[in-house]
Image (cartoon, rainbow, N blue to C red):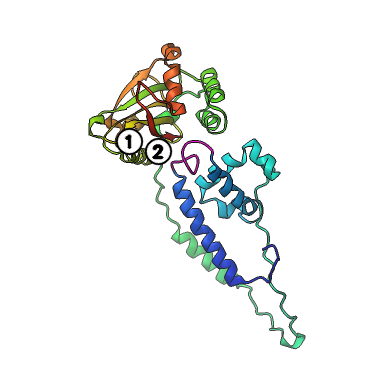
Amino acid sequence: MYGYRAYDETAHQNAVAELKRVFDALNKWLENRTYLVGERLTAADLSVAGSLLSMYKAVLDPRFRAPFVNVNRWFETITQQEKFRTIWGLDPNAWCTVAQKAKPAAKPAAKAADKPEKKEKAEKPAAKAAKKDDDEEEEDDTPKEVKPKNALDLLPKSNFQLDEFKREFSNKPLDEALDFFYKNFDAAGYTLWYAKYKYNDELSKIFMSTNLINGWFQRMESMRKYAFGVMSVFGEDGKNEISGFWVFRGTGDALPQSQVDVDDTAHYDWTQIKWSNVEAEKPRIRAYLNGDDLDGKPYADGKTFK
């Protein structure tokens, strides 16, 4: 594509297929993750994003990028880091809009005598009219099924933008993110909760407890725009427990029904945090969000739903 060597159509198509395979794998990995490793920015993110930078700037046009929403979200998160932009001299709005055209080898000009005669391509008016009538007859008048709205979408508009807090949490130091959260939280439109796994005495290995959280999060995809949560595993192999902190769109003293309907939600005891008491709960909330030890139990692992 850059013209460093003679263009080869077969090699080009093979490269595109391989790139899609890699992006598909990366997209699946990032489905429930903000970063490649753990819950904070690491050298892995910087290395991979740096490797993809030239492609995002010149090769991966919107049509190519569209299916890989998780990769795009992750790439944007990494490239918005101030130091990353400084090192790479990146314009954060410099994503490719039209892929750079490949440069095929020039073909010898055809002799005038060798030029094929132009074929008549015009379709007769009668044929066009017949085709149009056939197309109209084939149109399906069956009304399309309208997907019912989530009841949470019908609530009065809230000034607290959950997605904006998620970006703050992902890209800013925790103290700044928490400051944004407490200044902007809307207690009339959102509720706060603690969740504790009911069967902690049955847990075994740390990685198995983490997988339990991952499975639950995968089944919570429908709540992505209505919820934010951090679930932590405390303790050690053979003796550990799961608990966490949640923010849900909704009001009242009960979980949103759309969350209740998610498999595994019933496996947790839920305790609502009243906004009037949130000042006393700030140290505990911070511990969950920062991955700190809690109640004398060492932090072992955790996952964030956002």
Task: Work out whether mark 1 precedes mark 2 in sequence or the reverse, and give the earlier one.
Answer: 2
Among all residues in the image, which is located at the extreme left? 202
121 to the left or right of 106:
left
Residue 154 x %, y %? 44, 28
Task: Say which residue appears at 52% left-offset and 58% top-offset.
Answer: 20
Residue 173 x %, y %? 56, 28
Residue 33 lies in the magenta stretch: yes
Task: Say which residue appears at 51% left-offset and 18% top-offset.
Answer: 182
Q: Can you tell which quarter of the image residue 195 is in? A: top left
Among all residues in the image, which is located at the extreme bottom? 113
Residue 223 x %, y %? 41, 35
Residue 163 lies in the magenta stretch: no
Chain part drawn in magenta:
32-41
Task: Say which residue appears at 57% left-offset and 24% top-offset.
Answer: 176
Residue 262 - label: 1
Within 10 Å of disc 2 (Cα), the crowding (few <14, some 14-19, many 20+) is: some
Residue 187 - label: none
The amino acid type found where label 1 is placed reads: Val
The amino acid type found where label 2 is placed reads: Ser
- Does residue 67 appear in the picture of this structure? yes
Up-down relation of residue 1 to residue 190 (above or below): below
Residue for badge 2: 222
In front here: 295 or 28?
Answer: 295
201 to the left or right of 281:
left
Q: Do residues under tags 1 and 2 come within 8 Å of each other at their CB atoms?
A: yes
Task: Say which residue appears at 52% left-offset and 63% top-offset.
Answer: 17
Q: Secondary structure of the magenta portion, mostly?
A: loop
Up-down relation of residue 191 to residue 47 (above or below): above
Q: Judging from the image, what secondary structure is the residue with disc 1 in?
A: loop
Give the position of the N terminus as an image quadrant: bottom right
Residue 188 x %, y %? 45, 18
